[in-house]
Image (spheres, rainbow, N blue to C red):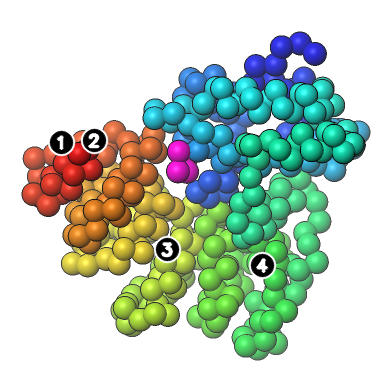
Amino acid sequence: MDTIDTISQLLHTSNSQFRLYDIGRKIEKIPKALFEKIELNQVPYPTPSQGHACIAIVFWQKKTPQPFLWLLKLPLDERGLLNQGARNHFIAIIIEALGDDLTQNVDKDQEALLKNNPYLYTPAQYKLAALNSKIKFELKQAPSEHLAPFVSYITGDNGWDNWQAVGVQGITDFAVRIREETTEKYSEILVNALPHLPHEVLLPLCGALENEVFSVDLINALLNLFKEKLRASPKTDLNVPLQQYLLRSLASNCQHVHVDKLVSELLQQQNISNELLIILSGRCWLALVNNEQLMAFLEHLVSSDDQALFNSVFKDLVSIPVIRPIVFQCMRSPERSDALSKAIGQLFN
């Protein structure tokens, strides 16, 4: 085999068709051209998660369309650039085990080599379900058998308390089709169902929706439900996680003008729970990509009087390339409070 320098080259050389997804913060497609630049260290990884690039690679051969899946966790350096040594080590292990036929049936020795690959990892089950749904939908494969029972449930015809037959895979299959033009009009069905859904269904549904862009009607319905729960009794044990999940559900739509307005109003409040601050930075960071909102966010974060939380969230935000320069602007701003200046000082000490 000729020298293989990148994962992209490895896949091309094996004549594989492939797609790439970021699976760290949310699940979203990585364009191949961008991934090639990432591998050449021409650009930092756009959505790092705890100092790593978490990537799903789906690949298949034209003659055997059944796809294979690699789930990778590759380290990044302090600038967010891919660790070349780790990437090269991953490639070397794959080539030793499989050569140039990545889709071959493996024997026990090859399987042992692959299983001992330190860069493979297993995400949380809800992410695996969402990834599986997205792959099948984008490759035009049939959904799981769990979709039909969920569609039947979400119409409300069988009663909102009869959710026991609902499966997470059915929920994620539904979510990836939320913008599909079908006779069922999933978005419209969900808007009508939202006020009635029990927590057992609503929470995993919000977790699935965080990966999808959807209609303004559904955005508004989720916003209204969030505001309703916030007004009702924001400190109750039930409403705090529900608020978190409702905010999470808007993650892929957080630059929409209506969501941006909500985040602005939220940051103008006197108090915000730590849980919501963590969702804002971890999932809805694109709503913080301006000086005013990010400064308000940092002031709320420091008011929690939890230096460990401040350090963790601050370091996480600095690692995201799109928001990193704005964080530095806020650090130097003469308008920052004494408390924020002190927290930043303690961070660097």
Q: Amino acid at mark 3?
A: Leu
Determine the CA span between mark 4 and mark 2.
40 Å
Q: Which residue is mark 4?
A: 168
Q: Does the residue at mark 1 contact the one at mark 2 (Cβ under 8 Å)?
A: yes
Where are the magenta residues, as a range? 47-51
Q: Is residue 318 above or below residue 129?
A: above
Q: Which mark is residue 328?
A: 2
Residue 48: x and y in percent read 47, 39
Report crowding for label 2: few under 14, some 14 to 19, many 20 or more residues within 10 A (C-alpha).
few
Residue for badge 3 = 247
| Residue located 64% across and 37% down the image | 118
Task: Name the element at disc 3.
Answer: helix
Query: Is 61 or 218 nearer to us in this picture?
Result: 61
N-term mark: 3 or 1: 3
Q: Residue at x 57, y 68 (%)?
A: 204
Give the mark nearer the N terminus: 1 vs 4: 4
